[in-house]
Image (cartoon, grey):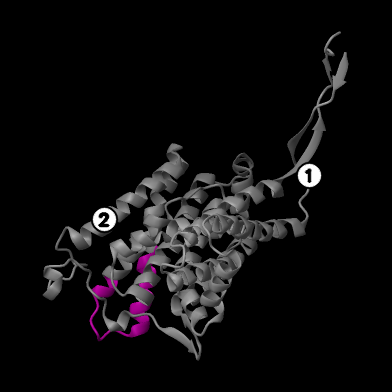
Amino acid sequence: MSAITRFGIRLEPRPDRPRWLVWAVPVCSFFAALLVGAVVLLVTAQNPLSTYLRILERGFLDQGALSGTLVAATPLLFTGLCAAVAFKIGFFNIGGEGQFYMGAIFASGIALSYGDDLPAWLAILSMIVAGAIGGGIWAAVPGILRAYFKTNEIITSLMLNYIAGIIATYLIFESESFWRELDGTGAVFPKGKVIPLITWWPNLDLGSLVIPFGFLLGIAGAVWLAVLQRRTRFGYEMRVVGGAPTTARYAGMRPSRIIVIVAAISGAFAGLGGAADVGNFRHVLDPKGLQQSGFGYAGIVVAALARLNPLATIFVAVILGGITNAGYALRGPDFPSGLVGTLQGLILFCTLGGEVLVRYRIVRTASTSVAVKAAGS
């Protein structure tokens, strides 16, 4: 007889989390995604170093590249904040995509109702408010269903994405709505009305760098959210509800009310992204373009990589915006067309894997010795 000791591993909750670990893991996850992406490129006969250098140049270093990156980062910043604030309290809002559409619909609708005699600042402010209301209302629906009817918000918010997309498509392609251009070529080829010039959002011109007003608005929103979460009573209630809903009830808080309010705030951020898309960039309600962009789903990657931190969301949005911008600039026969989406998926996968290492530590364990009968005995 002989004894064999088998070894295994198990995950053990960390009693404490060093501050360096909380930030080191997302950074390492990002580079791990690049490493896995390099393997994918090698398998497809591409040079990883050359490809990544081209992304760096076209996304950040070339003349005008950073301006384009900020354009790509603006919707990601808003949808990233949308996911970050909701996920923080355990409300898994997957509906940022639909809330983005509704923000674009509401903002473009209010803009099209104006003439040229309205002050520009008032027109832009009304678009901001309308976009926030549109997204907020759309997100409040799964919030109410979750808070008062215990419905799974992942399913309801996801299904509302498709409904919002259908509504936007109907307004432009299947009806003679207020949003559709019915004169000239618009009578034959469906397209949205261009919003009046007075409602076009401005840009901050710093010479070689042009910063969209929408990006500045996103930064202001991130700062506001950080202050709300850390410096206000409501922010404290959000943290308690997210960590221990039962304790929140015993403390006299109203978790259902907080969930609905946070859901509306989450949707308002996505709606602001839709308003910025119309006011700063497209200047028209473009259902096909919105649905092909996938900003709402990419925002989940942004929030995950930022560890749901509003201020970190700004920097992550710029990084992923640079990757996206480079993908647009490098699109061609010699550049893998699906690389940008692949990298975003790998970043999310590696970030979620890294989150496990933040919460748990890997412990090697030895199982009980097993007796094995020797051959020939």
Q: Earlier in the sequence, mark 2 or mark 1?
A: 1
**Prevailing SS of the magenta stretch:** helix
Quadrant of the image containing the N terminus: top right
Residue 95 shows which numbered tag? none
Q: The residue tagged with tag 2: helix, strand or loop?
A: helix
Seen at 42% across and 69% down, the residue is: 331
Residues 104 and 60: in front is: 60
Label 2: how many Cα within 10 Å (few below 14, some 14–19, many 20+): some
Q: Position of residue 102 (x, y in %)?
A: 34, 60
Residue at (50%, 91%) from the top-left corner?
Answer: 207
Q: Is residue 193 above or below residue 253?
A: below
- The answer to whether residue 120 is left or right of residue 212 is left
Position of 355 with respect to 122 (left or right) is right
Which residue was labeled with disc 2?
167
Q: Which residue is mark 1?
A: 15
* Residue at the image point whose x is 28% and y is 74% from the top: 111
Quick check: is 312 in the magenta stretch? no
